[in-house]
Image (cartoon, rainbow, N blue to C red):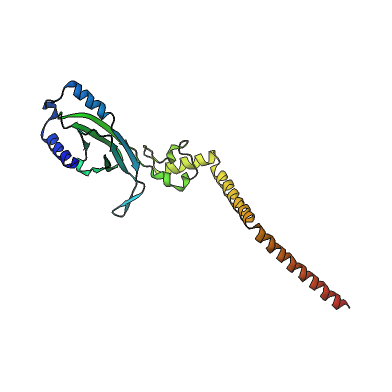
Amino acid sequence: MRKIKCLILIAIVTCLDFSCVRAQCSDEEIETLKKEASKIKITYEHLGVIKENNVEVHNKFLVVTSNIYDDFYIHLSPFATEDFIEEDDSLKINLTTGTWHYQVFSSKCGIKISDIEVNLPRFNIYSLDPLCEGIDDEEFPLCGKYYKYDVDYETFEKKVTSYRLQNNLDNQEKKQEDESILNKVLSFISEYKIFLLITLGVILLIISIILITSKDKKRKILK
């Protein structure tokens, strides 16, 4: 039902100049509506790597709008409102990186109450590069999940390699890898120590028998 009303409202917005429409509400009512509009909450979640037409896409977000006053209808610029999915008293839509405007209209007053600007960050494809492994993205933003500047791969590679050398990260990773292997060995010994002791005992017993047998043979030969 909300979707149908939204479409009707958009048709009105398209056909009329709202600057010429006289509000059917008092100043006090409009101020109240503005306060309600300030309560609108818009959150977004990065959708990760998704495939569209067999091509990997990294710049998609699920954007959720909640706390929408009953009198309000949302027009998303430049998309049409019919792309919204109404669910659990909220509006959901998949959007790409960029700046979007959530224009909030009052059906009673016939005017735009608010324009909420939403900036969706640009996903940093370099954050998936193996060179960024083990790097704190807060200290080195070029390896962060989002990065707004354009950097070619050659520049990225030089900067990351330099950062890794300056912070001795490769040696640290080698040390951590060695410690991990040692911890695994110690963990294995601790878990199977009884079995290992029995195995070691059996091996020592076999060696002792072989040595004793060998000595007996030598004695017999000497006699």
112 left or right of 167? left
Q: Quadrant of residue 125?
A: top left
Tell me the residue at 58%/50% (across/down): 180
Image quarter of residue 79:
top left
Q: Which quadrant of the view contains residue 16?
A: top left
Q: Nearer the viewer, residue 189 or 155?
A: 189
- In this rendering, does residue 17 appear at all? yes
Rendered residue at 45%/44% (across/down): 157
x%, y% of residue 122?
34, 40
Residue 128 at what x, y percent from top left? 42, 46
Tally of marks: 0
The spot of residue 66 in percent (x, y) is 28, 36
Residue 177 lies, with reference to residue 6, above or below; the image says: below
Task: Determine if residue 80 is in view.
Answer: no
Q: Nearer the viewer, residue 45 or 152?
A: 45
Quadrant of the image containing the N terminus: top left
In the foreground, 132 or 30: 30
Residue 15 place in picture, x, y as percent: 10, 35
- What's the residue at 22%, 27% (across, down)? 33
Residue placed furthest toward the right = 223
Q: Residue at x 61, y 53 (%)?
A: 187
